[in-house]
Image: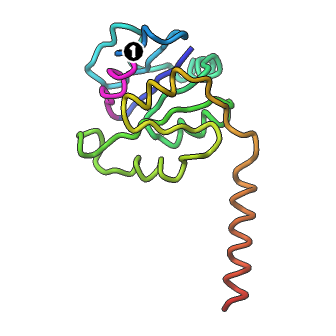
Amino acid sequence: MILVTVGTQLPFDRLVKAVDAFAKELTKPVLAQIGKGTYTPENMKWIKNIDPADFDRIFREASVIVSHAGIGTVLTAKRFGKPIILVPRKAALGEHRNDHQLATVSQLIDRPGIYVAHDDSELKDYLLQDLSSPSREDPSDVGRTSLVNYLKSYLAAG
């Protein structure tokens, strides 16, 4: 199953419409959590909000996650070892108050298991592929080593 999640705070009809437009072409069923959106999907199952008690189970059952670029969803995908396709909200389209989600994806692009779709064509292409899951490596160890090395070189230069 493909899980589309837009979060609970803001609508993201652009993402829901895009997946709905080609859901019939996909080989896996799609479940969309549409939140406060006003668009009603026609080609996939949908629910306004997933009950917190069911969220982990549904996430575990999904083979791929499609989401706004919310860091909580990214971390949950990592925790469950699920590939995630991020579609950042855009302030110019009235989807958020600023473009912090574009900044977020710029830092996450090219990380194992994370795919960034800036348009419907990229999104569809990713959904038609067999995507790799995220690395099981603990990113905090990598970040910690990088920070320690940076501080050592900074202090040595001082």
Q: Quadrant where the C terminus lies?
A: bottom right
- Badge count: 1
Residue 34: give x, y in percent of width and height: 38, 21
Name the residue rendered at 68%, 89% in the picture. Answer: 157
> Relative to residue 83, is residue 45 depicted above or below?
above
Does residue 148 appear to the left or right of 37 in the view shown? right
> Relative to residue 88, is residue 62 depicted above or below?
above
Name the residue rendered at 57%, 14% in the picture. Answer: 1
Q: Quadrant of residue 76?
A: top right
Residue ID for mark 1: 22
Q: Quadrant of residue 28?
A: top right
Would you say the magenta stretch is mainly helix, strand or loop? Answer: helix
| Colouring mode (rainbow / by chain / secondary structure / one colour) | rainbow
Residue 73: give x, y in percent of width and height: 53, 35
Q: Quadrant of residue 117?
A: top left
> Relative to residue 25, is residue 52 depicted above or below?
below
Q: Identify the magenta region.
A: 10-19
Residue 68: give x, y in percent of width and height: 43, 35
Residue 44: give x, y in percent of width and height: 42, 9
Name the residue rendered at 44%, 18% in the picture. Answer: 32
Label 1 neighbour load within 10 Å: few <14, some 14-19, many 20+? some
Residue 38 part of the magenta-drawn span = no
> Relative to residue 122, is residue 47 depicted above or below?
above
Name the residue rendered at 71%, 81% in the picture. Answer: 153
Q: Amino acid at mark 1?
A: Phe
Does residue 60 appear to the left or right of 103 in the view shown? right
Does residue 103 appear to the left or right of 14 in the view shown? right
Q: Helix, strand, or loop for circle 1?
A: helix
In the depicted view, which residue is nearer to us: 130 or 57?
Answer: 130
